[in-house]
Image (spheres, grey):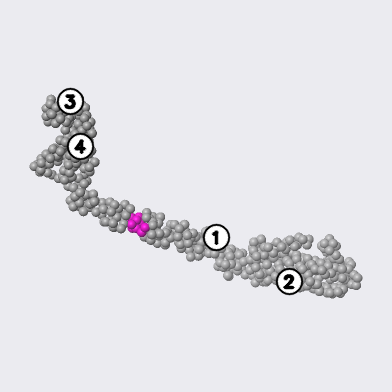
Amino acid sequence: MRVLLSGVLCLCMVQMGFAQNKDYKWQIGVGMHGPQFTINDDFFWSQNWRLKDWNITPPISKLSVSRHITGGLSPELSYSIGKIFFQPQIDKQEHLFMDIDLNAKYSFANGYILKTKSWFDPYLIAGVGATFVDKIAGAHWFFAINYGMGLNLWFEKNVGLNIQTIYNKLPGAAMQVGSGGNVYGDYMHHSAGLVFRFGGKNDKDGDGIADEKDACPEVAGIEALKGCPDKDGDGIGDKEDACPDQVGVAALLGCPDRDGDGIGDKDDACPGEAGLKELNGCPDKDKDGIADKDDACPDVAGMVNLKGCPDKDGDGYTDADDDCPEVYGKVKGCPDTDGDGIEDSKDNCPKEAGLVELKGCPKQVMKEEEKKEVEKKIATLAKSINFETGKDVIKKESFDELDQVVVFMNQYSGVNFKIEGHTDNVGEDAKNLELSKKRAQAVKDYFISKGIATSRLSSEGFGSANPKADNKLATGRAINRRVDITINQ
């Protein structure tokens, strides 16, 4: 029994801080009590529930006062008095008995184990006390250690029935009745009576906070929020919490702000990164007013119309895409003075609008006399264009003359040229025609390799169809194996 009571008491002490009940702080109990003494421990524990050993005192022989502190914990002061016999069937002498106890009670009707308004209100009790018994040998006052249990059955909110039993341990002490009489030790102390509680206020939601002080009297809440609930536990009452199911911060009416930038996650376009209010919570490393997530150049300040990329010369081309980032221009960011769509650095005629195929120069129309003079000079140079026998491979000794033709072509950059290939009549006509085409193309390719635009050149082969001399003679055949270069206006 003692081991069981000790274990229950320890459990009580572990749970003390959990509940809160402030409805009724004061409690007064009145009633009768019954001490029970036996001769020794062995006899005591085997006979302690025998009613014939109880000393039932008259009504109103016990008085107790307690005050609620916190949770289910209340200290109690009690006083008991009456006339007793030490086992009436053995001791025939009446004794005066008094008991003064200071105990702590732990109620299970604390809001966690049982509801605070429960009619069934069991509790554990433990403490210390002083016991007085007269007409015994030796001392009359004894120190006692008390622990036990009790039960309040509430008829209504202020009145109830109390039943209690306590085991009183008298450490190292014993009561000897008469000279050489029986020796008595620990005793049980039973009591029953009425209990009254005071100070209660209306508490409709049962949260331990009186309605007059409860900001949310219809819903159970917590004291820190004046009785209002806080589902997410962030310290902001649900009725004031814009995000009652998520832990948040007071500055955002209870809504979360993971990145701590002062913008709630629900309104933050970048909830995982601290950012700026004007950018909906997104960061802007280069401070150009464009959020990093939308900035094509997040590390360099740029322009809104260029997705945050810089444009030093202000021509509308980002520096990365601007062929001339330091100079204003509209052709890939480069200047085009004549407006022909060809940047000045690549325009052979930067001050005259021209054609792409003429490298920015205008198409030239030559007078007939000038045309004849130029063609005559080019024809003289063309006579020295020679090929490997039966092949379309230009001999190296012909390169100088070809380069001089290139000079004319660059001089007359607005003029187109036609290249014609011819052969003698030796061999099959089909093969001669194919060879003449390849030789004309070989010359054209040479001019292109020197920078002449392809669009300015055309080539054709005629085989032996257009001889200039008699193919019967070796000298005639040599003249007929030729390449003619003419102006093609």
Mark 3 lies on residue = 426
**Is 244 situated left or right of 141 in this image?**
left
Residue at x 21% of width, y 40% of height:
447
Q: Which residues are magenta?
A: 300-310
Q: Label 4: state its secondary structure.
A: helix
Q: Which residue is mark 1?
A: 232
Majority secondary structure in the magenta region: loop
Quadrant location of the N terminus in the rendered image: bottom right
The part of the image, by quadrant, that contains residue 131 is bottom right
User: Which marked residue is nearer to the observer: mark 4 or mark 1?
Assistant: 4
Q: Residue at x 43, y 60 (%)?
A: 275
Q: Which quarter of the figure has residue 287?
A: bottom left
Q: Tell me the element at label 2.
A: strand
**In the image: residue 119, left or right of residue 484:** right
Sequence-wise, the earlier of marks 4 and 1 is 1
Q: Earlier in the sequence, mark 4 or mark 3?
A: 4
